[in-house]
Every structure is written in structure tokens, then in C-alpha cells.
Amino acid sequence: MAAEDGQVPQRSLGREMAAEIAARMHQLDEIKGRLAQLQQALKDREQRRDALYAELERSERDIAALALAGRRLTVLVEEQRATVTALEGRLAQTAQDLETARIELADLLRSAYAMGRGDRLRMLLNSEDVARSGRVFGYYRCIGRERVAGIDEVQRIAAELMALRSEAESEAWRLQRLADRQAQTRERLEQAQTERSAIVAVLDANIAEGRGEVASLNANARALRTLVEQLRLKVEIADEIGLNPVDIVSRKGKLAWPIAQARLSLRFRQNDGDNDLHRDGVLIEAEEGSEVHAVHHGRVVYADWLRGFGLLLVIDHGDGYMTLYGHNQTLLKEVGEWIGTGEIIALTGTSGGSASSGLYFALRYQGEPLDPERWCRPDRG
């Protein structure tokens, strides 16, 4: 590679890579902290969900008990109603017997009266046996007393039946009110069960979402650990690597953008505090397959797929400075290759799950993010 001023002093990459490793380790620590928070939140949600499930179980058991009690009450109410119906039947029969007895007694009285008047007349005209007539009247008196006693008994039975029917109706009414109250209680429990079920469904969804985020963070952490290990391997030979003398610091504000006429769809926002992996760089809009140029000379220290960034290429520029180029369609350089300023290093794409075609571009100094807009030309030409 040709140097911009013809001088090629040796520079050590060991210190720079160590800084990059430290930055990655710091990022790993942040991910671990976030994971710990998520796992605790998941634990709390799961405990809340389990408590709701326990309440749900108790409610369902209460509903089952109330349903059983309600069924038994329904049977009792039906039995009481059947008893009332039977008593009403007996009462109707008793009333009929009473009416029959009254009619018979009335007939007996009319017959005795008619017979008595006739016998007394015959006794005066025919001198009939007085003893026989006395026996006949005594017979009628006995029958009359029995009829009256029968009527009294029927009336007594009717009064008892009326009292029993009144008691049976009162008991049936009491049981029906109890059944109604239990039905209302069951409705309230079922409503509470429905509300708890909705809460449990929301908690399950939150837990599933949290687990997905935990899985994603774990995957990102594994990818970063792999990258750190790769960088550590490079430290062993870093002291033998030299770079061109024109350092990137002297070109601050004058670097060409990796894509000409760059339009930023996402700007640098390191201090926003969100979990977006792109916040420490910028996203540049570009048609798929557009050429990506190195903003400064250096050596490729990483060229591979990385979760969240897709096909990523990292160039070390010396003195702790690096540039990163992600979401590429393809990489045109390999690890260890020396790159000149403006050299084509990749073609843009959507790798790594990018929603639209473009390039992720970032600068680092000893692992700390830098705002690309302060280092590249304002005109983006």
C-alpha cells in the first residue's frame, strides 16, 4: 500500500487492540447487567403469575363447591315444592271429604227430623211401641255424633295440612333465596376468574417477550466474546504491524464518507441510554450493492458476520483508532490485508437483519465511540 507522504514508521497495534478488547469487555459487562435486570424482572413476573394461578385455582375450587351446593339446593327446592304439591293434593282431598261429611250429616239430620215427626204422629194415632221409637231416635243420635266427630277430625287434619303447606312454602322460599345468593356469588367469582385470566395472559406475553430479549442479549454477548477472543489472538502479533505515517487525527473533519453523497437515516446518539446497537455509530442509506470505501488507510482486523451487524469489516488505523462497516452484502477484503484511503472494501446490503439497504459506519478511539459527523466532511461528497 502506498503511504500518503512516503514514510512508513512502525506502530504498535497491541495497545490499540488491548483498548478495543477492554471496550468490548465493557460492553459485555453492560449486557450482563442488562441480563441480570431482565432475569430479575422475569422472576418477579413469574412469581406474580404463579400467585395469580394459585388465586385462579382457589376461585375455580370455590366455583365448583358453589355449583355442587347450588345443585343440592335445587334438589331440595324441588323436593320442597313436591311436598307442597302433595300437601295441596291431600288438602284438596280433605276438603272434599269434609264437604261430603257435611252433606251426609245434613241428610241424616233431615231424615231424623222427618222420621221423628212421623213416628210421634203414628204413636198418637196407632199407639205404636214407644220403646222401639226410642231406640230408633237413639240410633240417629249416635250416627249424628259420629258424623260431627268426623267433621271435627277432618277440620283438624285440614288445619294441620294448611300449617304444613305454609311451612313447606316458607322453606322452599328460603332455599330459593339461598340458591339465588349462591348463584350471585358464583357469578362474581367467575368474573374475578376472567379478570385474573386476562392478567395471566398479559404476564405470559410479557414473560415470553422478556425471554426473547434475554435470548437476544445472550446471543449478542456470545458474539462479542468471540470477537474479543479473536482480537486477543491478534495482540500476539500486533507489535510487528506498521501503519502509514499520516494519522487519522490530522484528518479529523476532512475524511471522505464511506459512501459518496451519504444520507444519514440514523445519527450518532451514544448517550441516549437505549439498547440499540447502532446508537454508537450512524446508518447511511444506500442502494444494495453500492461500493463502500475505506475512510482512511489501515489494516483489516475483522471481516466476518456478527450478530446485529451482519457482515462486518473493522479497520485498524493505528494510535487506537478503528472504523467499523456493517450490514454489508459482501466483504471484498480479508483479515490482515492492508487498505489504502478510498479503497473499495465492501458492497452495501441488508445483512444482520437490517430493515433497509445501507451501511452501519462507526469510529472508535481506544474502544470509545466517536461521532462520525465530526470526523467526516460536512458536505458528504
Image (cartoon, rainbow, N blue to C red):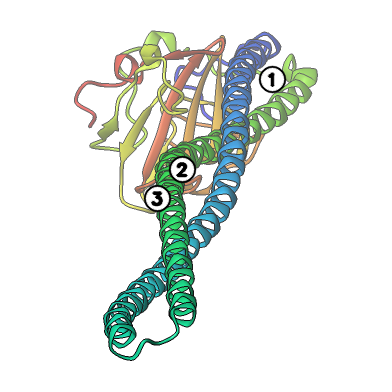
Q: Disc 3 marks which amino acid?
A: Ser
Look at mark 3 in the image and give the residue it sits on.
166
Query: Circle 3 — which element?
Result: helix
Compare residues 345 and 108 and report the one nearer the observer: 108
Q: Which mark is residue 241?
A: 1
Look at mark 2 in the image and give the residue it sits on.
182
Sequence-first disc among 3 and 1: 3
Up-down relation of residue 305 to residue 159 (above or below) = above
Quarter occupied by residue 18? top right
Circle 1 residues within 10 Å: few <14, some 14–19, many ≥20: some
Compare residues 132 and 106 and report the one nearer the observer: 132
Residue 309 appears in view: no
Spatial separation of the CA atoms under disc 3 and disc 1 = 110 Å
Quarter of the image for the N terminus: give it.
top right
Up-down relation of residue 295 to residue 358 (above or below) = above
Circle 3 residues within 10 Å: few <14, some 14–19, many ≥20: some
Sequence-first disc among 2 and 1: 2
Q: Disc 1 marks which amino acid?
A: Ile
Query: Circle 2 — which element?
Result: helix
Quarter occupied by residue 116? bottom left
Tell me the residue at 47%/72% (across/down).
Answer: 138
Do the CB atoms of the residues marked 3 and 2 lie less than 8 Å apart? no
Query: Circle 1 — which element?
Result: loop
State which mark lies toward you, 2 or 1: 2
Is residue 53 found left or right of 253 in the rendered image?
right
The image position of residue 76, as x and y in percent, is 54, 55
Spatial separation of the CA atoms under disc 3 and disc 2 = 24 Å
Quarter occupied by residue 154? bottom left
State which mark lies toward you, 3 or 2: 3
The image position of residue 226, as x and y in percent, is 72, 31
Quarter of the image for the C terminus: give it.
top left
